[in-house]
Amino acid sequence: MKFAWIDVRSVPEAQVESVVDAAIHARVDAIVHDDETLLGTLPATVRRVLLSEEGPTPGTETADLVVLRPATDMSGLDRLRALHRAGDEHVAALVDVVDDQSLTLACEAAIALPHTVVRFKDPTKIPLEIVIAAADSSPGQLICQADNLEEAKIIVDVLEKGSEGVLLAPRDANDVFDLMAMLQTKTEPLSLSTLTVDSTEHLGLGDRVCIDTCSHFEEDEGMLVGSYAHGYILCCSETHPLPYMPTRPFRINAGALHSYVFGQDNRTNYLSELKAGSAVLGVAADGRTRRIVVGRIKLESRPLLSIKATSAEGVQANLIVQDDWHVRVLGPGGTVRNVTELKAGDQVLGYVATDKRHVGWPVGEFCVEK
């Protein structure tokens, strides 16, 4: 889980209280300020970070206060290292990355200290990639400053893993809530079911959709597609070798254009609705999921094949796909099954849902699909 540090130093005085309240209620990890008095009023549920080169005023130290000190050269970092070696678990470095020398300093700090905040002069994320890679095996926390929410979204995905934390100076309380909602967005694993094939049927010509994504699929990964809101079959990517054509590990030959494809937040889309920039859900044979961006869809007329299957609970699923040997679905354990070779009694992986659907959202209403 990513976390947020909220810098309230630049928040207008009239809004500081509301921003601090929002940060506490949204459960941000830390509030940053250069005012010890304000930090001393905060509850123990939020980390208190004092931005100060000199540290807290002697005799007024707040318990568990993290002191964030600027580190501008190796000698400054050495002083922070010495504090940490002496037992200070709340020492933190603020490093402004403006050139190769300061980038090296940021890497060293991220490796050595409990907390390192980095700020980058240039918009490129290459320096952040380097710091993330350097600190990958370090137990310390890496926090990257974002100028706005859009940049925060980019930061958390750099090198797929991003920095552990994001530092943001919010404009108002809404920015705090929006940041936390963005950081908490994740895809939950799904409990897949084994479905037994009842029958297949050649349907003749129809329109099918290929989903070309911006990601490389793993061998046991695909998408859940189906004709009904209550039952889906796990369609395989073109990661596996095929005769007569190269592999396309970014592609799912997903199904007829009317079909549902399963997405984030228990939401579905029709295949016909997808376009460049849409988000879909990649699903692995063990139920792992991840958000995947669509690069394009290809809608073309092809002969179609209907696959009917039933779960152990008696829930029926239907998948209509291109009627060709190179179109595949996944079976138990991630086995690859060519759709034209499926027969009654074969097993495929799928997902059983109890929800009916209205414009893709689950809804509790009477609905029959067949």
Image (tube, rainbow, N blue to C red):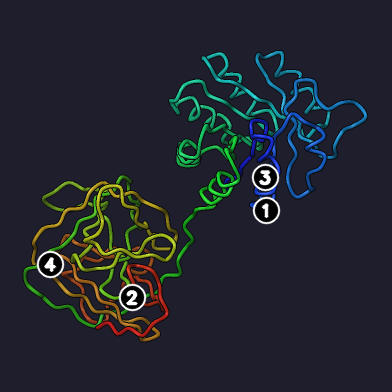
Element type at marker 4? loop
Q: In this view, does 85 lie above or below 260?
A: above
Q: Is residue 162 above or below residue 107?
A: below
Give the label, 2 or 1, closer to the camera: 1
How many numbered discs sit on the rendered protein?
4
Q: Which label's residue is closer to the chain start, 2 or 3? A: 3
Tell me the kind of residue under disc 2.
Gly
Give the label, 4 or 1, closer to the camera: 1
In this view of the protein, which residue sits in the foreground, 334 or 264? 264
Give the label, 2 or 4, closer to the camera: 2
Residue at mark 3: 29
Name the spot of residue 128 as percent of width and height, x first: 50, 29
Q: Which label's residue is closer to the chain start, 2 or 1? A: 1
Residue at mark 2: 231
- Whether the residues at callouts 4 and 1 have beta carbons within 8 Å, the answer is no
Q: Residue furthest right?
A: 59
Q: At x 59% / y 20%, what residue is drawn?
A: 96
Element type at marker 1? helix
Name the spot of residue 349 as percent of width and height, x first: 34, 70
**Badge 2 local density, few (<14 within 10 Å), some, or many (20+)?**
many
Tell me the kind of residue under disc 3.
Asp
Residue at mark 4: 323
Residue at mark 1: 25
